[in-house]
Amino acid sequence: MEFVDSSVVEQIEMKMIRPSQFAIRDKFQRSHLDCETLVNSIREHGLLQPILIRPLEHGFEIVAGHRRFQACRTLRWRFIPCKIRELSDKQAYEIQLTENIQRKSMDPIEEAEAFRRYIIDFGWGGVSELARKIGKSEEYVSHHMQLLKLPDEIKHKIMDNSLKVSQAIEIVQVPHDKQQRIVSEVVNNNLTVRQIRELKMALKEEETFNKIIASANDESRSSAIAKKASLTLKITLARVDNLINEVHTTIEPDQRAEIINFLMGIRLKIHSLIDESIRFKNKKPGS
């Protein structure tokens, strides 16, 4: 169905207009320089685009144009050009959210909070509906909302651009006691997503080693070493399998056979060593 704009453009007295009750952002302030630039532009050229408002009981509410409204208030305007449109709370929120996303005026955590309010607090729709309304993918919306699971100190690193969204997403599912350790590595070394995944795998392996060491307190030292040896070989086998998969995806078919045969030979030797370590581990002391 074709959209029909039924809005009306009129000069409205500024004292009759109030900020949105569903403001996407808690603060509409920009840097002093940005605000001053907007004020000077409006002083010289006038307001080139009316603000969007909707009628409510006892006045009007801003839907889009909070910064322009504040700039005109700084200039002590009595009236301001407005586009007036009948809108529901949900429609007004969607317009504000879309405008802020298009202007890239929100950091990822602010976006995530806005998505959470739309879906959970207000119950206006699910991830797919919101994604369609704001012109983003469902993955974009769901990934941003996952960021809200992170502790505040990590959220602040996202807000100040020390940590990218793609990097932060990899950290969400990491146990809380290890998140700060990974974040420090990511920030200090600017790790890629692939490097973060490798780091997570290394931490998992370390955790497995630690569990084995803890469980070995009541066992003989040789049994604990045997378990560690067996685990190390299994980890090595998994890494060789990853190399074989990498060869299949990165090496040309005519160059693939020789290196595959080489890796398969290593794989057979590791299997044999794993069998030996299992036999040693199950061997009774003194036998």
Image (cartoon, rainbow, N blue to C red):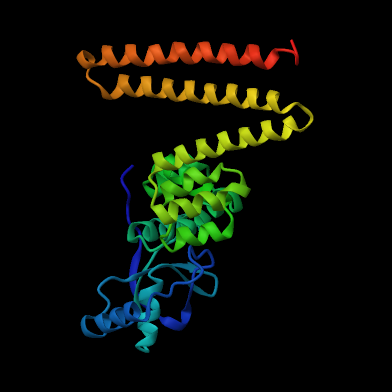
Q: Position of residue 234 (x, y in %)?
A: 54, 21
Q: Position of residue 123 (x, y in %)?
A: 58, 48
- In front: 97, or 215? 215
The quarter of the displayed image where residue 198 is located: top left
| Position of residue 73 in the picture relative to residue 227 (left or right) | left
- In front: 286, or 284? 286
- In front: 69, or 137? 137
Identify the residue shown where x is 40% and y is 39%: 194
The quarter of the displayed image where residue 47 is located: bottom left
Identify the residue shown where x is 59% and y is 47%: 178
The answer to whether any part of residue 152 appears in the image is: yes
Identify the residue shown where x is 40% and y is 79%: 70
Query: In the displayed structure, would residue 11 be above or below residue 277?
Result: below
Query: In the displayed structure, would residue 110 be above or below residue 193?
Result: below
Identify the residue shown where x is 54% and y is 75%: 58
| Position of residue 81 in the picture relative to residue 112 (left or right) | left
Q: Residue furthest right?
A: 218
Quarter holding the N terminus?
top left
